[in-house]
Image (cartoon, rainbow, N blue to C red):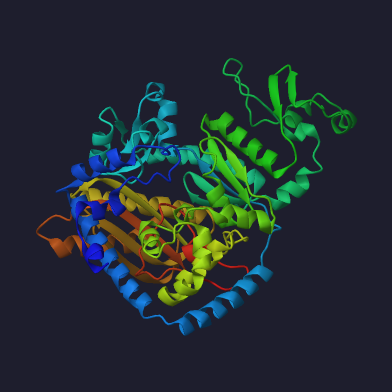
Amino acid sequence: LSGAVSSSSGADLLSRIALNDNKAGMEGLDRDKINKIILETSKGSKFYENELKKEQQVNQRIEKMMEQKARITKEQLKQAQAEVDKLTCELERSRELGRVIVHVDMDAFYAAVEMRDCPELKDKPMAVGSMSMLSTSNYHARRFGVRAAMPGFIAKKLCPNLVIVPTNFDKYRAVSAQVREIFSEYDPHFMPMSLDEAYLDITEHLEERKHWPETMRTYYICDAKTGNDADRSAAESERDELSPVLFEDSPSSSPSLSGADGKAEVFGTSAEEAVREMRFRIEQKTSLTASAGIAPNMMLAKVCSDKNKPNGEYRIPPERQVVMGFMKDLPVRKVSGVGKVTEKMLAALGIVNCDQLGQQMALLSLLFSGTSWHNFLHISLGLGSTCIERDSERKSMSTERTFVEMSDAEAQYSLCRDLCQDLAQDLQREGLKGKTVTLKLKNVKFEVKTRAFTLQYAVCTEEQIFAAAKDLLKVEIDSVSPQPLKLRLMGIYYTSQGSSTLPPSKKPKVLSTKHTIDKFFKGNAGQKV
């Protein structure tokens, strides 16, 4: 085992840089062929060297873990199983199935926006990003193994005809704002996770929806020739023409209406129909599609949103037996928060799916930290947070950009200000303030550094945030002087007053407004895991 784990061969490195076909649109590809191209293209690059270093570190962790496992006694396992059983009973008693949580994820968002605005790209494999790193790819490109977070130079080897379009965040933010307007009608306190995804609790909406006449659940189909607005419900458009009595007593019983303004779509009152309506309105308003997951908690909703991508939805009914059946064969990597490092460490123990995760929980409790194995236990039981974090509870926000090599100090300061501006707008929109500013930098060797500064009082304006972030950036620029600071990623992470959700020394793991992994897997028993 030791020899295998310490190996730094190309085959060993593949576990880090190989094709991750868990992504929608990448099923059934020739993994061996794609992985060979990825490996050969990566060799000698800074990306390869950095991934090789990380892989060696992971292998050392696995080696220590396996040595620790060999020392575990039967008595220790027995005691650990008793502790696992006790916690499992507590969690089962607190299982909450009464909320209807939705995770909405725009399909290949950046790429979809670019294809919408440049129709000639629709039938071509394309991605958004640069030769150094891609942000996303369309479904044509995914058939070649091209994915987000892949260096563009590798993607071009996989797909020589790939069109790479530079990112345009102003455009994506504008489209995201349109989508969020629709979200707010189903859950005014929805939680955006990035520009292209959000969590909603539609429990209250569904209660109200039960009493709505069909006209309030009817939306006109947008016709390019007539310019109809799909977001204008039939109820709104007919209200001027119908008396109050007619409006209340004469809803159409037809699932499809035709009137002076053209055809319309009628939606039902169930959770599936409400989400289908939401997705319909998004497509009509933006010409972009969205996928959604509907479940009793956030963890399950996130997994479900990937089940019928693109342009689909999937629901897990609020029944324990159904939830457990769904989790049984689910690969652990499908769960948000389980990355390639955790996946490899679990695989070394023979754990690939969530059923195996549950079976080996006693062993995991002896090999992993309390936080980690508690997370694993929640996952194996299909448990997750049922309380979407509201604005007043949100403790942190962040934004970051990946780009081609940037070594000009003025350009770096300019980008820093842009990020602070984005963050300030989000803070002010949600009425939040913060005290700790964390600067995240990734250099051209793919090494990540974070630097934090805590202010004396909570602030929320662009100038106040930038004042702190600029000083942190200056320290890093001066530290390598007279050589330039060569960057490929910059991020600003902002933590609210008094929050200990994520210490400044921790590396932010999100691209936009996010909650933390701890919050995501917070159990209903009230214990953070």
Residue 500 appears anywhere in the view: no
Q: Residue 133, position in %: x, y?
A: 28, 44
Query: In the rendered image, which quarter is residue 333 located in?
Result: bottom left
State the residue at coordinates (58%, 29%).
284
State the residue at coordinates (62%, 48%).
294
Q: Residue 226, position in %: x, y?
A: 61, 16
Left or right, 334 with reference to 84: left
Q: Residue 442, position in %: x, y?
A: 26, 56
Between 29 and 308, the residue placed more toward the observer is 29
Left or right, 137 with reference to 95: left
Residue 453 appears anywhere in the view: yes
111, above or below 135, in the image:
above
Quadrant showing the N terminus:
bottom left
120, above or below 322, in the image:
above
Q: Residue 175, position in %: x, y?
A: 48, 37
Between 387 and 233, the residue placed more toward the observer is 387
Left or right, 212 with reference to 340: right
State the residue at coordinates (36%, 81%).
71
